[in-house]
Image (tube, rainbow, N blue to C red):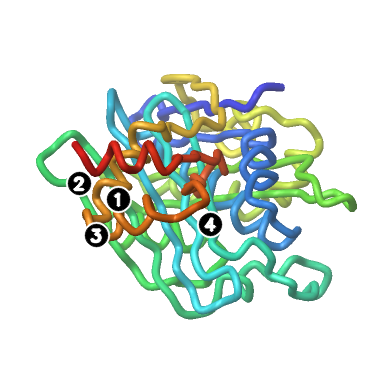
């Protein structure tokens, strides 16, 4: 089943939600980053959460999430656009932490102290920037905390990543449910019970439930309409021209020093790990521009 996201709204207009499968997407990103199992779960969750929040984007809008913590992973980030193109990176890809009660210690890998940063490019003069302190460092709860406190939209987020013994991601996905201003109390109570009774998300994903089936489970007894379905895939928009501009931004003195070295200058994209190589002659031409 190809990774995709389904976005819905309840027929009474009181709830909106999205669910996604992100197995191939998370595996593609984590394999490029060279993550160990704990780091893969952490980054896979953030990538999935970014895709879910991206379901609210339109047109050329973009979204970036970044977590900075005092744990061994240091910094994780993911970006998406309205078309479901997602990329992600991690500063330190190996957490090297033991299991905690049989579970990956994601909170310990991220760190108990730190911040969640949210940047939205909505096509205005300046992008919107939000920031909250990490709530539990479990990613899903931090995203729900941000949405509820900073954007004033009561939200529930579920994220799941299952790692096989060989370190590969065999299942990944998640859901986002938000209460709108006209939500009725009885509907919220009904939904809260569904969320409480929901089996572990990785269990549902490993059983092969598609995003719409996860939403049907959550919204049992609550009629809804499907608004959109979006394919999700890894895509990095780095280009050689961008790297060239980045080198120019270093300043003439530093660029001159690079051009005088015997070996070529290489720049590696932090997201896709593409290596861009510039010869001494190319750098000297940049100096002449």
**Tag shown at residue 253:** 3
Q: Are marks 2 and 4 in contact (CB under 8 Å)?
A: no
Circle 1 residue: 119
Which quadrant does the C terminus fall into? top left
Q: Secondary structure at mark 1?
A: strand
Q: Left or right? Give the position of 157 relative to 258.
A: right
Q: Position of residue 91 (x, y in %)?
A: 54, 62
Of circles 1 and 3, the one toward us is 3
**Mark 3 crowd level (few <14, some 14–19, many ≥20, 10 Å Cα):** few
Q: Residue at x 66, y 22 (%)?
A: 2
Reading the chain from its start, which is encountered first: label 2 or label 4? 2
Q: Secondary structure at mark 2?
A: loop
Of circles 2 and 3, the one toward us is 3
Of circles 2 and 4, the one toward us is 2
- CA separation in Å, label 1 and label 3: 32 Å
Task: In the displayed orientation, state which residue is furthest to the left.
Answer: 125
From the viewer's perspective, is residue 153 above or below residue 91?
above
- CA separation in Å, label 1 and label 4: 17 Å
Q: Residue at x 52, y 72 (%)?
A: 136
User: Residue 187 is drawn in which quadrant?
Assistant: top left
Reading the chain from its start, which is encountered first: label 1 or label 4? 1
Circle 4 residue: 140
């Amino acid at each position: 089943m190809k990774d995709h996201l389904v976005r819905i709204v309840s027929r009474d207009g009181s709830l909106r939600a999205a669910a996604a499968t992100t197995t191939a997407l998370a595996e593609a990103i984590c394999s490029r980053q060279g993550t160990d199992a704990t780091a893969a779960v952490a980054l896979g969750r953030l990538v999935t959460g970014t895709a879910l929040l991206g379901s609210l984007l339109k047109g050329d809008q973009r979204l970036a999430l970044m977590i900075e913590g005092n744990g061994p992973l240091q910094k994780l980030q993911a970006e998406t656009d309205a078309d479901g193109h997602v990329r992600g990176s991690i500063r330190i890809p190996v957490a090297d932490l033991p299991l905690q009660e049989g579970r990956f210690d994601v909170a310990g890998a991220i760190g108990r102290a730190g911040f969640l940063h949210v940047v939205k490019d909505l096509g205005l003069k300046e992008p919107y920037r939000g920031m909250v302190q990490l709530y539990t460092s479990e990613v899903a709860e931090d995203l729900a905390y941000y949405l509820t406190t900073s954007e004033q939209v009561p939200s529930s987020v579920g994220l799941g990543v299952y790692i096989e013994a060989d370190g590969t991601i065999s299942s990944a996905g998640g859901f986002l449910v938000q209460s709108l201003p006209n939500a009725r109390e009885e509907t919220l109570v009904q939904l809260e019970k569904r969320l409480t009774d929901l089996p572990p998300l990785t269990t549902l994903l490993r059983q092969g439930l598609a995003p719409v089936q996860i939403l049907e489970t959550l919204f049992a007894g609550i009629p809804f309409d499907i608004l959109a379905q979006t394919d999700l895939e890894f895509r990095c928009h780095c280009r050689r021209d961008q790297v060239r501009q980045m080198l120019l931004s270093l300043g003439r003195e530093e660029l001159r020093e690079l051009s005088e070295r015997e070996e070529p200058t290489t720049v590696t994209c932090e997201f896709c790990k593409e290596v861009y190589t510039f010869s001494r002659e190319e750098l000297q031409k940049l100096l002449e521009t």
